[in-house]
Image (cartoon, grey):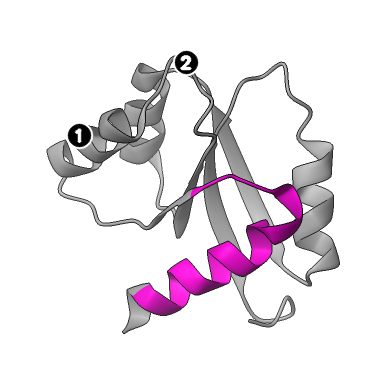
Amino acid sequence: MSAETTLVRILVIRAWTIAETPLRAALLRAGMAVEITRVDIEPAVNAALMRRTFDVIVLDPNMPTVTRQDVDDCLRAQRLWIPIVELREVERLADDIQHALANRLN
């Protein structure tokens, strides 16, 4: 994936109290050009999905307010198929996103 040619639109579901800077920096170090929209409650997930198109969703599995099932339900209700990457390690996120996007194209 080339940062010069591809902008990856990411919906990040993560608490606002956790800094976004390390996540964004890790993606930039991996050469990814990203546009990040961040939400932390299920109604905001729905609203974001209705307003714009995303290439991938990054879900912090430690979010108490939004579960994987909530995200799946939102996608199903809106008839969308967007890969979901669970955020485990910030430094591996770029690889996980690239893998998810490659699987989406196959």
Mark 1 vs mark 2: in front: 2
Q: Which residue is mark 1?
A: 73
Q: Position of residue 22 (x, y in %)?
A: 83, 42
Which residues are the magenta region?
Answer: 86-103
> Which residue is pictured at 54% across the width and 26% down the height?
62
Callout 1 crowding tier (Cα within 10 Å): few <14, some 14–19, many ≥20: few
Q: Which residue is mark 2?
A: 64
> Which residue is pictured at 32% across the width and 29% down the height?
46
Residue type indicated by callout 1: Asp
> Which residue is pictured at 46% across the width and 56% down the height?
56
Residue type indicated by callout 2: Pro
Q: Position of residue 79 (x, y in %)?
A: 15, 48
The residue nearer to you, when weighing 53 against 26, is 26
Residue 93 highlighted magenta (yes or no):
yes
> Which residue is pictured at 58% across the width and 44% down the height?
87
Task: Give the quadrant of the N terminus.
Answer: bottom right
